[in-house]
Image (tube, grey):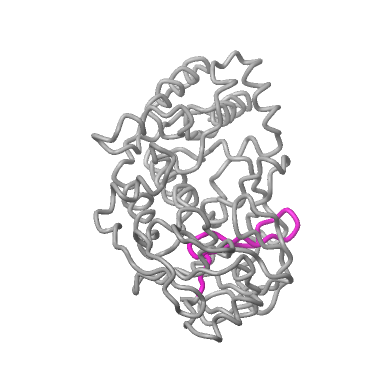
Amino acid sequence: MNPTVLVGMSGGVDSSVAAALLTRAGYRVIGVTLNVWPEGEDVAVIEREDACCALGAVEDARRVCAALGVPHYVVNFRDVFRRYVIQNFVEEYRRGRTPNPCVRCNQFIKFDALLAKATAIGADFVATGHYARNTRVETGRWALRKAADPRKDQSYVLYVMNQDRLARALFPLGDLTKDETRRIADELHLHVANKPESQDICFVPTKNYRDYVRKEDTTAVRPGPIIDAEGRVVGQHEGVSFYTIGQRRGLGISSRRPLFVTEIRPEQRILVVGDEGSLYRKTAHASQVNWVAIEGLHGPMRVMAKARYHAEEVAATIEPAEGVVRVVFDEPQRAITPGQAIVFYDGDCVVGGGVLELEPRQNGRRLAEELRDGAGETHGD
């Protein structure tokens, strides 16, 4: 019997073409759409056309599956989505950090929970419409590689894929460009061929995370002081949940020069601001590291590092440091943000990745000097 694959169907063109290609390749395809929106949620959330978890995704996915002649089911993942994605999203902002919900959704929802469902029904694989590739290498390990189309590569948000997940994952779009994907959808007369791209933070109805955090966390509005690098109070903020490192707008500070958030101290409800030069750091740390290309890090290693989804890769050295990975960039990097993912590459292969951590630094002249030259060393939490 041909292998069975559960395809996560978001109702978009990417997952639709993934299902079509697998069907063409002879797999027994089962389309699955994940119901992750909470009951009673604002209609604006579940009807957003550009949200991969929108209510309309069910109908779009059902129509595609009907056109392909494959079964389609809706699976209720509301509770696990709230527990692992939404609650973490709100909690991270409460802690003065900037989360990446797409990474956690891939880890806990699109693969862990969906793989558990696949196992329960005896399916062999799980497939998605991500642009990435996974291959077996000489060492016997599974490698996660960049997509052929650098403009659409999504390996950054898939760094959490461990060996077990990679062994049962299929990425049919890894060798395609987005234009080729849409062309295939058009040739197959799939009605989603020209559907808009889904956007990050799909569960936020207004596309403004501050509105969502304010609704979900009744304790988020906790005003506090905004101070400069010398410790002088220069303003007041609404609550640390509403700010992120590098933010300039919305500070409500009158100043002759542009000021940016350079540090967030949630326990003290303090924002530290400084000039743009204060945003640059030469070092950072990564926690919760998942190694992909290697089993573990035993000494310094040269890599290309990517500290945001849309950031450029930069040269760095990584080394083990008491339960975390120390990252030393060749050149100081702007607005290294706790909570964001940092992913390490060797060519087109993902070496591993983790969550960025920075140690809050003390007030005073030494802080000002460190911020000015970006040379202050940081440590993990």
Q: Where is residue 158 in the image (x, y as percent from the top left)?
A: 56, 51
- Residue 16 horizontal/vertical position (percent): 54, 26
Query: Does 201 sit above or below residue 67?
Result: below
Res 381 → quadrant: bottom left
Magenta part of the chain: 337-358
The reply to whether residue 290 is visible in this rendering is no
Q: Can residue 95 be seen in this view?
A: yes
Residue drawn at the location 50% of the way across and 85% of the way down: 364
Q: Which residue is drawn at 24% across and 34% down?
A: 40
Indicate whether 256 appears above or below 61: below
Indicate left or right for 65 with 131 as reference: left
Counting from the top left corner in percent of width and height, residue 264 is at 44, 68
Please state which of residues 296 and 366 is positioned toward the viewer in this rendering.
366
Give the residue displayed 59% in from the left and 67% down from the top: 275
Is residue 104 rendered to the left or right of residue 149?
A: left
Q: Give yes or no for residue 338 being in the magenta stretch.
A: yes
Magenta span has 212? no
The mark total stands at 0
- Horizontal relation, residue 190 to residue 360: left or right: right
Give residue 262's position: percent from left, percent from top: 52, 68
Q: In this rendering, would 294 be left or right of 239?
A: right
Image quarter of residue 41 = top left
Q: In which quarter of the image is residue 163?
A: bottom right
- Pick the residue in front: 90 or 190: 90
In this picture, is 311 found above or below 369? above
- 367 in relation to 57, above or below: below
Q: Main secondary structure of the magenta part?
A: strand
